[in-house]
Image (cartoon, rainbow, N blue to C red):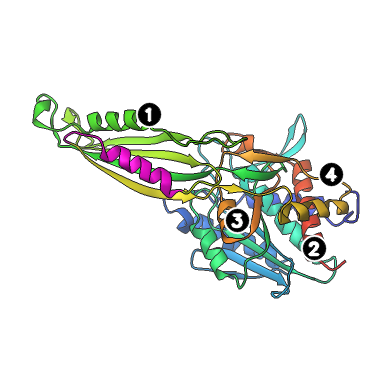
Amino acid sequence: MTGKLAGLINERELVAIAQTLARFPAPQTALMEAEPQVQAFIGDCVVPLLAQRGLSGKRDAMGNLVIEVGSKSADRSLLLMAYAMTHPASAMKDPYSGTIVDTAEGKAIRGRGISEQKGSLAAAIVAMSSAQRMGTWRGSLVFALSSAGETGRHDAANMILDSLPALPAIGVLALGTDNRVSLANKGRIDIEIVVRGEACHSSSPWLGINAIDGARIVLDRLAALPLSSQAHPVLGQATLTATHISSGPNATHTVQNEVHLTFDRRILPGQNPAEPFRAISDACAAIEGPWQIEVRRGAYMYPCEIAQDGALLRAIGASRKWLDRPAPEVFYSHAALDAGLLVKRGCDATMWGPGRTAQFHSNDEQLLISELVRGAEDYLALIADTVIEH
């Protein structure tokens, strides 16, 4: 590393921490944040790693970990939020070995979640630990490890923010973004639709009401539904995508009396999640026929957009003097996470961290060590310039 932070990031320590995290499973299951492996990952893996480095905090009712360092009354404040939960192992072979592999671009760490959540978490841990050796705190650093990560909802983040005495002015969601800073991302609302009919033997279909016929009309009606009058200049149009369909009863030669549909409705910055839900509800209510159609509002995440001349981007730009580097690249994301919630509540926040988005959920997920080191340096520089006396 060049610049004022030379020698403060120990690559061997960073890699060892990343491997430790990769070897501890924390998969998404039907239990979501309450999954015992996720809770154990926080309590039995991450908490001891932090304690060894003089960092301790509190866990809340959802198992989130919050550590506050520095002066709580300081005007300068930074939130660094990381995530515990990863995508399930799925078809990935040997997903929790945390091995070092050779690639055409250099050595990399392999493991489920290493590119999406765990690499950025390792970078955040080492950056915080290194910052403690730099001098006196002149501001407030809040580190939060969310028990979420793959849930698609703001529940864990809301609990974290509600526990803080004051909302930090700027925030970073430690997540793999190719070490680029997200300027905007779409939000999302899940919409669940149940179409009910009446079961009967399929040899006499006129005796029942086939819910599949009603579901076909729902699909056609929503495919023709206008989504928004305006597009985002970079993110483009909003989208509505069917992501699940199932029917019952699960029996042969039976007209189905119930069909369950799930839709992913992406929301553009500036749009309210209530508006697309209302439009879809109205479209389904207008369908004529013998079916009963119920529309339910599922999990949602707010869209996000921050200004390039806002507080966070100014802070990141100012911190680059510690690294003798230009400002990081920026990008726009079609994915949704907690940045929109933070911005809505008054914290200028972004997604930023080591890990390539193309690796997310892949069968050979890996993270280049060089990119991991760069991410830790980025975090340390921001912490140093924002909340360390110098």
As measured in the structure, the alpha-carbon distance from the residue carrying label 4 to the one carrying label 1 is: 46 Å
Label 4 crowd (10 A; few <14 / some 14-19 / many >=20) = few
Residue labelled with disc 3: 343
Q: Type of residue at label 4?
A: Pro
Question: Quadrant of the image for the C terminus?
Answer: bottom right
Give the mark nearest the N terminus, 2 or 3: 2
As measured in the structure, the alpha-carbon distance from the residue carrying label 4 to the one carrying label 3 is: 25 Å
Give the mark nearest the N terminus, 4 or 3: 4
Give the mark nearest the N terminus, 4 or 1: 1
Residue 141 vs 282, above or below: the answer is below
Label 1 crowd (10 A; few <14 / some 14-19 / many >=20) = few
Residue labelled with disc 1: 224
Q: Which element type, helix, strand or loop, lies under badge 3? A: helix
Q: Which residues are magenta?
A: 273-290
As measured in the structure, the alpha-carbon distance from the residue carrying label 4 to the one carrying label 2 is: 21 Å
Residue labelled with disc 2: 131
> Do the residues under discs 3 and 1 have CB atoms within 8 angstroms?
no
